[in-house]
Amino acid sequence: VQLQASGGGTVQAGDSLRLSCVGSDRTFSSYSIGWFRQVPGEGREFVAAIAWGSANTYYADSVKGRFTISRDNAKNTVYLQMNSLKPEDTAVYYCAADYRGLPDSDYVTRMFEYDYWGQGTLVTVSS
């Protein structure tokens, strides 16, 4: 599956953005989708994930209550609604897909479980 992430931009602290991740595969609904982010010079960290099938959702503690992940399988799209943005949310955001991934809160945070990655979209939050 090919993934296309979009929706990044430059906003002020407290603003909102919605990221989209569009998949090319007609079996998109069978993929768990995760969002990760990376600051230049640092490692990539887990942000949120949504499971295939159950659509269970998982969040990093740093974004819980502010970010919401959702999916629309009819549009082959997963969204990441980001509210109350903070300067520390500044990063390149990547979406990733894992075919029939295990709906487990530890499993979904592991980058190496995801087989397909999008190109990333930059989010910049100014104070």
Image: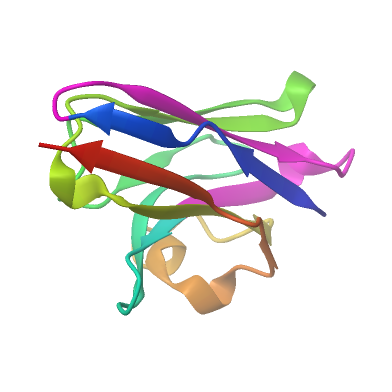
Q: Is residue 25 left or right of residue 99?
A: right
Q: Nearer the viewer, residue 106 or 63?
A: 63
- Residue 79 in magenta? no
Measured as percent of width and height from the top left, residue 8 is found at 47, 36
Q: Position of residue 95 (x, y in %)?
A: 56, 51
Start and end of the magenta stretch?
A: 13-35
* Residue 74 position (above or below residue 55): above
Q: Quadrant of the image for the C terminus? A: top left
Q: Is residue 15 magenta?
A: yes
Residue 39: x percent and y percent? 32, 65
Q: Say which residue appears at 59% left-offset and 33% top-offset.
A: 78
In this rendering, the answer to whether 3 lies above or below 53 is below
Which picture quadrant has residue 65? top left
**In the picture, which quadrant includes the N terminus?**
bottom right
User: Residue 88: image x %, image y %?
Assistant: 16, 51
Q: How is the image coloured?
A: rainbow
Q: Is residue 81 left or right of residue 42?
A: right
Quadrant assignment, res 101: bottom right
Farthest right residue?
Answer: 26
Which one is in front, 64 or 16? 16
Say which residue appears at 48% left-offset and 72% top-offset: 111
Query: For the point 72% across and 26% down, which residue is it?
Result: 73
Residue at the left extreme, as displayed: 127
**Hey, which quadrant is residue 38 in on the image?**
bottom left
Observer-nearest of 16 and 70: 16
